[in-house]
Image: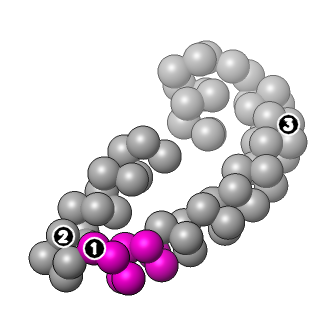
Amino acid sequence: MLYHGLVIEGRPWVQVKSNVAREYPKIQYTAWTFWPVVGWVNHLYVPLQFHVIFYSIIACYW
C-alpha cells in the first residue's frame, strides 16, 4: 500500500498515511478470515505435492 501510493500513484506522504490508517484494518481483518480457510482447504483436500502451487494460485488472485 505504501509503495503503490507513493511511487506508482505519486500521492503525497500525508495522503498515503491516512489511506493506510483507514484501509489497513479492513484488509487485515479480511486476510485473517480468508487465509485460515484457504489453509484448511489446502491441508484437507489438496494432495501434498500441490500445496505450494495451490497457495501460489490463491495468492495471485488475492
Residue 42 belongs to magenta span:
yes
Tell whether 60 sits left or right of 52.
right
Query: 18 or 46: which is nearer to us?
Result: 46
Element marked by disc 3 = helix
**Is residue 38 toward the left or the right of residue 27 in the image?**
left
Q: Nearer the viewer, mark 1 or mark 3?
A: 1
How many numbered marks are there? 3
Q: Which residue is mark 2?
A: 50
Image quarter of residue 46: bottom left
In this rendering, the label closer to the viewer, 3 or 2:
2
Residue 23: x %, y % from top left: 79, 42
Local SS, label 2: helix
In this view, 50 is above or below 6: below
Give yes or no for contact between labels 2 and 1 (Cβ–Cβ under 8 Å): yes
Direction from residue 25 to residue 40 in the image, left or right: left
Mark 2 nearby-residue class (10 Å; few <14, some 14–19, many ≥20): few
Q: Amino acid at mark 3?
A: Ser
Q: Is residue 16 above or below residue 28?
A: above
Q: Which label was assigned to residue 31?
A: none
Q: Is residue 31 above or below residue 44?
A: above
Q: Nearer the viewer, residue 14 or 58?
A: 58
- What is the magenta range? 39-46
Q: Are marks 1 and 3 in contact (CB under 8 Å)?
A: no
Most extreme residue toward the front is 45
Q: Amino acid at mark 2?
A: Phe
> Which residue is depicted at the point 36% across and 82% down?
43
Mark 1–mark 3 Cα distance, whole angstroms, equals 40 Å
Mark 1: amino acid: Val
State the residue at coordinates (48%, 67%).
38
Residue ID at (31%, 51%): 57
Q: What residue did someone put label 1 on?
A: 46
Residue 18: give its label. Answer: 3
